[in-house]
Amino acid sequence: MAAKTSSFITEIPLITTSKDLAILAARLEAGRQLYNAVLSEGKTRLELIRNSELYQQAKAITKTKKKSRSTAFQKAREAYIFSDYDLQAFANKTAIASVWIKSQLDANTIQKIATRAFIALERMMFGKAKKVRFKQKGQFASLEGKTNKQGIRWTGNCVEWSGLKLKAIITNDPVILHGLNSKLNMFA
């Protein structure tokens, strides 16, 4: 588990049992499956947008008219329900439909997984990436929550997450001590 501070990530080892590792593996697998489902849905919606008349009209607007061009593209995305919030809603519905995924992941983690997929799709949409990559078994290595108030939480010297409590191994390493004394932004 790594705590992200304002300028760097501090990795702190955790004390785990084989049971803890099995629970974490199941949660990572649930996260991977949900990520791939959201990514697939997002790709479908993005393809519909690109094939739509609204999108073609937006592309026809000259680049010098930035505001009207941007508004036209936004209308195309709205018509096909393509935004971070929309994919979060899809992820929540998907998780509710799958009792196993819902039992493994909390609402904040589900929403962050959807945001992660949306960011990948957005990179493709804006031409910064040629394609998005689905995660294979074992490739989904981290999960995060939205805040430190619920879901995955750092409390004192341990990580707590839906009944799982993992104590941190804190040494006198100056890097770790600096990370622990810095403002906590999120987990990755």
Image (cartoon, rainbow, N blue to C red):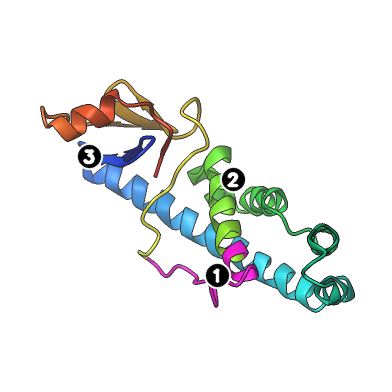
* Crowd around label 2: few <14 · some 14–19 · many ≥20 (10 Å): many
Work out how far the residue at label 1 is from the one at label 2, CA to CA, in angstroms: 23 Å
- Point out the tag, 1 or 2, that comes first from the N-terminus: 2
Q: Nearer the viewer, mark 1 or mark 3?
A: 1
Query: In this orientation, does residue 169 appear?
Result: no
Tell me where residue 48 appears, x and y as whole percent. Answer: 78, 74
Which residues make up the magenta segment?
122-137
- Judging by the rendered image, the residue that carries numbered circle 1 is 128
Residue 127 within the magenta-colored segment of the rendering: yes
Tell me where residue 89 appears, x and y as whole percent. Answer: 70, 49
* Residue displayed at 39% across by 29% down: 184
In-front residue for pair 147/90? 147
Work out how far the residue at label 1 is from the one at label 3, CA to CA, in angstroms: 39 Å
> In this view, which residue lies farthest toward the front?
64
> In this view, which residue lies farthest toward the top?
156
* Residue displayed at 51% across by 44% down: 105
Q: Nearer the viewer, mark 3 or mark 2?
A: 2
The reply to whether discs 1 and 2 touch (Cβ–Cβ < 8 Å) is: no
Please give the label number shown on residue 117.
none
Please give the label number shown on residue 16.
3
Report the quarter where the C terminus lies: top left
Tell me where residue 50 appears, x and y as whole percent. Answer: 76, 75
The reply to whether discs 1 and 3 touch (Cβ–Cβ < 8 Å) is: no
Q: Is residue 121 left or right of residue 62?
A: left
Hey, which quadrant is residue 60 in on the image? Answer: bottom right
- Judging by the rendered image, the residue that carries numbered circle 2 is 111
Tell me where residue 3 appears, x and y as whole percent. Answer: 34, 37
Q: Amino acid at mark 3?
A: Thr
Work out how far the residue at label 3 is from the one at label 2, CA to CA, in angstroms: 26 Å
In-front residue for pair 185/135? 185
Q: Is residue 86 left or right of residue 118?
A: right
